[in-house]
Image: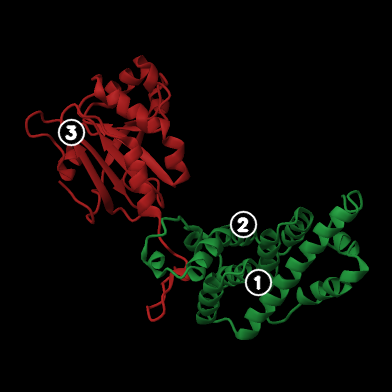
Chain colours: A green, B red
Amino acid sequence: MTLNELMETVPAYARDLKLNFSTLTQQPELTEQQVWGTAVAAAVASRNGELTQAVLAEAAGHLSPQALEAAKGAAAIMGMNNVYYRFMHLTANQNYRNMPARLRMNIIRTHGVEAADFELWCAAVSAINGCSVCVDSHEKTVREKGLSEEAVLAAIRLASVVHALATVFDAEKVAAPQAVSA
Amino acid sequence: MLGVGEKFPSFSLTATVSTEKDPQKAFKTITDLDYSGKWKVYFFWPKDFTFVCPTEITGFAKLNKQFRDRDTQILGGSIDSEWVHHAWRTHHADLKDLPFPMLSDIKRDLCEQLGILDPQGGVAQRATFIVDPDGVIRFVYVTDGAVGRNPDEVLRVLDALQTDELCPCNWHKGEATLQIA
């Protein structure tokens, strides 16, 4: 199912999300790569198979293969960092922050796309995964690399809606298992 | 002996890359500029056709995929000629399908520059170097005599060298921010 076709299956109670999604992929504050990279990273982080598949297929028409890989990579690595560093701010024991993480995260250096965009995707995923340390540090880095607050917010809006859509598709799958197939 | 932080020497050596009978296919010239962008593990042994060496070499061969996954090229070597390497690989079951080249440092140039020629025997010592993509030595490991190396340890160190906390999540208030390339 294409992304457009999938969006047509969004139930009436989630009409807001469907409309938000279509508006938010057109936000002028973001470049095409930023929009679709955010959508990809957010979809991957939101864990619904159908949405992820449809977003990946659609994004392939908007992103270079390198950017598509990088967006998936951002979601992948933040899946790890968001848990690890969230632990750091959840625990009262500050000693852990001074101990070596021993976690490979070379993709943060080797992703091959604009650093600001990769960091933006990391910030979006961190917002979804709820890591406050990550949100703070990636937001700061993105702004240092030249993106405006408006651009950051645009990405967060999009990520929020993608996440919400994932929950809807999960709910609909349970409600009517045969309804949302290809 | 060259140490951590020093540049690995330039070299251009014939290497044995397969047991094909055709020399065009069996041998290849390899230089320090090959495998650009990759890490390298160079490991030397004293002599072909001896006993400890094949177990170490096959030890590295078993881990070749793990090294490849870490963008690392293994390069073995001794002062034996490429033909001796070829004969050894052809006749030793465990070395036939070796997935990495065997360098022939026949003039002892490279070993001399590395400082690993044994003063008694005149052949290479059992030395291993991890070299980063900029050509800088990051780990040196040498054992005496008949004590074989532990390739798992080399992998462990490589992994640790490659593991950097690149995430700004590690930033502590008041510290300078990370310079991410």
Examine the image and state in which quarter residue A102 appears. bottom left
* Front in this rendered view, residue A122 or B61: A122
Q: Which residue is drawn at 71% across and 77% down?
A: A157
Q: Which structural element holds mark 3?
A: loop
Q: Identify which amino acid the numbered label 1 is placed on.
A: Gln
Q: Is residue A101 left or right of residue A120?
A: left
Q: Name the residue under label 1.
A: A34
Disc 1 residue crowd, few under 14, some 14–19, many 20+, Cα 10 Å: many
Q: Do the residues bearing badges 2 and 1 touch, measured as CB atoms within 8 Å? A: no
Question: Which amino acid lies under the numbered mark 3 shown in the image of this protein?
Answer: Ala
Q: Mark 3 lies on which chain?
A: B
Circle number at residue A69 = 2
Q: Horizontal and vertical percent for residue B53?
A: 27, 25
Q: Which residue is drawn at 38% across and 60% down?
A: A100
Question: Residue sitting at 28 percent across and 54 percent down?
Answer: B136
- Residue that mark 3 sits on: B124
